[in-house]
Each structure stands twice: as C-alpha cells, then as structure tokens.
Amino acid sequence: MDDTRVEKAIAVDAAGDPVRAAELRQTYSRLLAALDRLPADMRTTVVLVALQGLSQAEAAVVLGCPAGTIAWRMHAARKHLSKALRTLRPKPLPRRVRTADLSAELRRELCEAGLPVPVMP
C-alpha cells in the first residue's frame, strides 16, 4: 500500500531502523485502512481525540454533539480498530507435547540423535 501517511509515520517512528520500519509498515497500513473504513463522524472523532489530543469535551464542542456521543464513538472505534489489528497478533503456540505422547520409536530416535529425551512423569 503506497500511502504517504504510512511513509511519514514510519519515517518518524522507525528512526532509520529498517527492521522496525518493516514491522511498522504492515501495522500502520492495516490501521489506516481500518480507520478509513470508519463512518465519517467516528473517524473525525478519532482524529480529534486520539491524534489531535483534544479532550472528549473539546471534541464535543467542535463537533456540536454531547460528550457522551464522543465517548461512545471512541469506544466503538477502538473495538473496530482492535478487531482489524487482531489478525496481526502472533498465533498461539501449539500445545506442548506430553511425554506420554512420545512413542517408544520417537524416544529411541531422539536418544540416537543425541537429543534430550523428556522424562515420563
């Protein structure tokens, strides 16, 4: 995704570290795509509160709505954005193999290879 917003954010946040830049590029691209899909009033609320640093009361004055509406929009936006980013989290590791699950043949192979053989409980 060639988005100047992503590139500008990476230039600031990666501080010249190419590994960090690669990590951030995927996260920022996904985040901005999710932000762009928010309804306009919710997106504007997020920009004012989360990015511009306005309080919810100040954002309510700017947008001409109750502060409770701003709080609700922020809550809904967080849920939506969190869901969009959830797929970036690492998958849980598979369950540990219990020593009882190891066959006699596998135990022998491990032993022959010089690898540690788990002790059965």
Image (cartoon, helix red, strand yellow):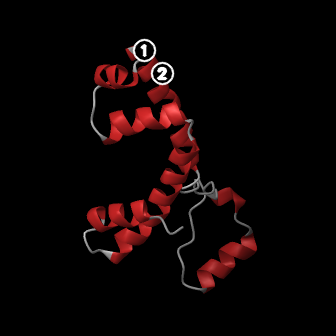
Residue 68: mark: 1
Residue 58: % across, % down: 29, 23
Asked if labels 1 and 2 touch by Cβ distance under 8 angstroms, the answer is yes
Q: Is residue 102 left or right of residue 39?
A: right
Disc 2 is placed on an element classified as: helix
Which amino acid lies under the numbered mark 1 shown in the image of this protein? Gly
Q: Which residue is mark 2?
A: 72
- The alpha-carbon separation of the residues under discs 2 and 1 comes to 6 Å
Which amino acid lies under the numbered mark 2 shown in the image of this protein? Trp
Within 10 Å of the Cα at label 2, are there few (<14), some (14-19), or many (20+) other Cα atoms?
A: few
Residue 53: % across, % down: 27, 36
Tell me the residue at 54%/67% (across/down).
1
Q: How many marks?
A: 2
Q: Is residue 64 above or below residue 106?
A: above
Within 10 Å of the Cα at label 1, are there few (<14), some (14-19), or many (20+) other Cα atoms?
A: few
Quadrant assignment, res 28: bottom left
Quadrant assignment, res 39: top right
Residue 74: % across, % down: 44, 29
Disc 1 is placed on an element classified as: helix
Q: Is residue 40 above or below residue 66?
A: below
Tell me the residue at 53%/49% (across/down).
85
